[in-house]
């Protein structure tokens, strides 16, 4: 950044008229409104409001970009994902430095497929597609980035600004408290709080974890080990943020993740598999497209825990073949598992063909067992109320008499 630009930026900041009063008192704060009537409360339970920041932390390559995109699409329509909006709709923007246009297209198409499978209408999808504004920022870090962000919020006022990843725009040493404080408290805070006449808003800062050095993998950290302080850099990141969510891969899976609301998590009012309050969730990548799902089926979680040893210790490596054989419960039980999978897809309205079913079965069992499981299901599917239409798709609609024998 040139010295001339810094001087110009300093002059602009000094000339700006902050809205904050010189002081107030507790008596001057006014009465506490019902949450539903308070425009400053963006999420139920006052989990996050205008002027506050959410820190979303995970390691590289886990799917942070798709998770934050899924959240923004949901919140734009006032729908719950991780947190439940307090307003009918939240206007959101995304600033990102990692994903190419093609990456964003792939994420978009995955979101469309995933939300369709979860019952979203074409009208809702259209609103989500147009509802998240993509702010493009290239070549700006530190104070210059904050000046650009202030200008963007003036021109296109939103309720939530997501920045992915924050390290891409920070421009300093993330471990130095002085650098972090200057960026967050002098640069980001005034924008979120509307100090220079902009609309007050909240921020979602996407943050990387530190890299694992040699010898650390065996005693790997988990989301419950000081989850609020997982992440690269100074503790000031956590001290500053109003809420924090962290998610890490489970021990034996590329698709399943432990997610924890590590700061103000109780306000989300999540329930565990036993129905009791929790700040933890299991989330997973969907099969076939870029989309996240919350794993809330107790049987699926118990199976996952059984494969990992169940005692919290890192299990010895086992082969993929061994894992598949452990899931082999015999022909009848395997056929029931196939039926459950088919019914789950039909319930979601997802099209399912025989090839797709075999592919899924081979991910759960070795090939011979998979073929047998699908074959047993095929033998009994009409008894279970599952037919095939003329195009070979599974359906719960019984065909007319003259085509019942078609496969």
Image (tube, helix red, strand yellow):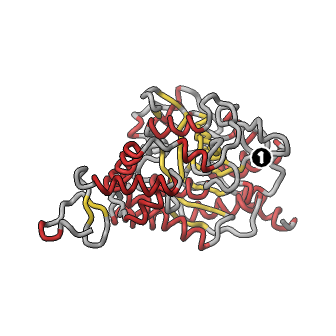
Lateral position of residue 24 relative to residue 286, left or right: right
| In-image side of 238 versus 393 (left or right) | right
Task: State the residue at coordinates (67%, 67%).
Answer: 137
Label 1 packing within 10 angstroms: few (<14), some (14-19), many (20+): few
The relative height of residue 300 versus residue 397 in the rendered view (above or below) is above
Whole-percent x and y of residue 291? Answer: 50, 57
- x and y, in percent, of residue 194 in the image: 59, 50
Q: Residue at the location (36% across, 45% down)?
A: 336
| Residue at the far left in the pictured view | 401
Q: Is residue 255 above or below residue 282?
A: below
**From this viewpoint, which residue is outermost toward the right?**
3
Q: Is residue 218 visible?
A: yes
Give the quarter of the figure containing the C terminus: bottom left
> Residue placed at 47% from the left, 61% from the top?
359
Which quadrant of the rendered structure holds the N terminus? bottom right
Q: Residue at x 58, y 55 (%)?
A: 161
| Residue 269, percent from left and from top | 46, 32
Residue 112 on image: x %, y %: 44, 64
Picture quadrant of residue 60: bottom right
Q: Which residue is mark 1?
A: 210
Is residue 40 or residue 203 the one in the foreground?
203
């Amino acid at each position: 950044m040139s010295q001339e630009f810094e001087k110009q930026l300093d002059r602009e900041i000094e000339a700006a008229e902050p809205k904050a009063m010189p002081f107030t008192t507790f008596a001057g704060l006014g009465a506490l409104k019902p949450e539903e009537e308070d425009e400053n409360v963006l999420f139920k339970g006052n989990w996050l409001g205008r002027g506050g920041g959410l820190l979303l932390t995970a390691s590289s390559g886990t799917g942070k970009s798709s998770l934050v995109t899924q959240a923004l699409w949901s919140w734009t329509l006032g729908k719950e994902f991780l947190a439940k909006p307090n307003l009918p709709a939240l206007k959101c923007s995304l600033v990102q430095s990692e994903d190419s246009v093609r990456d964003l297209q792939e994420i978009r198409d995955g979101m469309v497929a995933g939300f369709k499978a979860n019952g979203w209408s074409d009208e809702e999808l259209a609103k989500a597609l147009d509802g998240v504004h993509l702010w493009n920022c290239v070549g700006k870090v530190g104070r210059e980035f904050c000046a650009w962000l202030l200008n963007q919020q003036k021109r296109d006022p939103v309720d939530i600004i997501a920045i992915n990843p924050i390290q891409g725009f920070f421009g300093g040493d993330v471990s130095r408290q002085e650098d972090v404080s200057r960026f967050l408290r002098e640069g980001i805070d005034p924008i979120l709080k509307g100090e220079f006449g902009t609309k007050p808003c909240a921020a979602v800062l996407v943050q990387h974890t530190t890299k694992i050095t040699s010898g650390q993998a065996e005693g790997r950290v988990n989301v419950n080990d000081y989850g609020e302080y997982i992440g690269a850099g100074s503790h000031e990141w956590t001290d500053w943020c109003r809420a924090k969510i962290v998610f890490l891969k489970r021990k034996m899976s590329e698709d399943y993740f432990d997610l924890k609301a590590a700061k103000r998590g109780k306000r989300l009012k999540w329930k565990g598999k036993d129905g009791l309050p929790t700040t933890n969730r299991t989330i997973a990548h969907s099969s076939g497209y870029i989309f996240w799902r919350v794993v809330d089926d107790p049987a699926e979680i118990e199976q996952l825990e059984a494969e990992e040893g169940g005692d919290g210790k890192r299990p010895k490596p086992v082969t993929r073949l061994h894992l598949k054989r452990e899931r082999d419960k015999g022909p009848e039980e395997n056929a029931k598992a196939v039926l459950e999978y088919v019914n789950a897809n039909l319930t979601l309205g997802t099209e399912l063909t025989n090839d797709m079913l075999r592919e899924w079965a081979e991910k759960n069992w070795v090939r011979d067992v998979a073929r047998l499981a699908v074959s047993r299901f095929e033998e009994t599917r009409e008894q279970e109320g599952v037919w095939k239409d003329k195009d070979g798709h599974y359906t719960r609609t019984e065909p007319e008499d003259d085509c019942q024998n078609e496969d």
